Amino acid sequence: MRTPSGFYRLLPLLLLLFFAACSPRLEERGRASYYAKSFQGRKTANGETFRQGRRTAAHKTLPFGTKVRVTNLKNGKTVKVRINDRGPFVSGRVIDLSRKAARRLGMLDDGVAEVRLSYKKKK
């Protein structure tokens, strides 16, 4: 039995489309800011004590404990953070970062940066 040779050329593309469609990763874009020093030691929404030296963040809707990869779109730097608080409550902002995470993204001087969030969908 002969198989059309065009099928073998399309197979990688079909597999790529299939797995991309089934991918549990989601993305979000917007502006990121970081916590002021005065938040050090306060309680977060999930009950933890906030520490600037940890890679944590606040998001309005993601479940606590979600791991998020944040990419600074200006310089391409990335950091992985864990959601442990709610916010930001400023229009246009999608995430508030700890100082350590903001430093890794190279956004301490700017204060606010355009970012892409990438995270796995919870089942």
Image (spheres, rainbow, N blue to C red):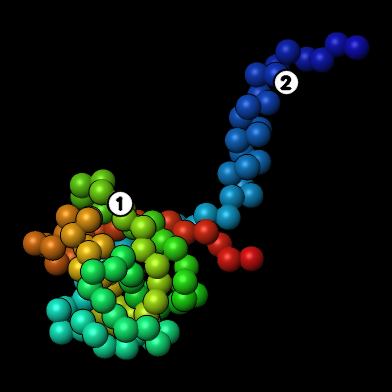
Residue 48 pos. (x, y %) = 37, 83
Residue 101 pos. (x, y %) = 26, 62
- Which quadrant of the structure image shows residue 116? bottom left
Residue 34 pos. (x, y %) = 21, 71
Q: Is residue 68 above or below residue 10?
A: below
In the image, what residue occupies the spot 14% across and 67% down? 111
In the image, what residue occupies the spot 59% across and 50% down? 23
Residue 28 visible in rendering: no
The one of 11 and 25 positioned closer to us in this rendering: 25
Mark positioned earlier in the residue sequence (1 or 2): 2
In the image, what residue occupies the spot 65% across and 19% down? 9
User: Type of residue at label 1?
Assistant: Thr
- Which quadrant of the structure image shows residue 3? top right
Circle 1 — which element? Answer: strand
User: Type of residue at label 2?
Assistant: Phe
Query: Residue placed farthest to the right in the image?
Result: 1
Query: Residue placed farthest to the left in the image?
Result: 109
Circle 2 — which element? Answer: helix
| Quarter the C terminus occupies | bottom right
- Which quadrant of the structure image shows residue 98? bottom left
Cα–Cα gap, marks 1 and 2: 39 Å
Q: Which mark is residue 78?
A: 1
Per the image, the residue denoted by label 2 is 7
Q: Is residue 80 above or below residue 5?
A: below
In the image, what residue occupies the spot 25% across and 59% down? 114
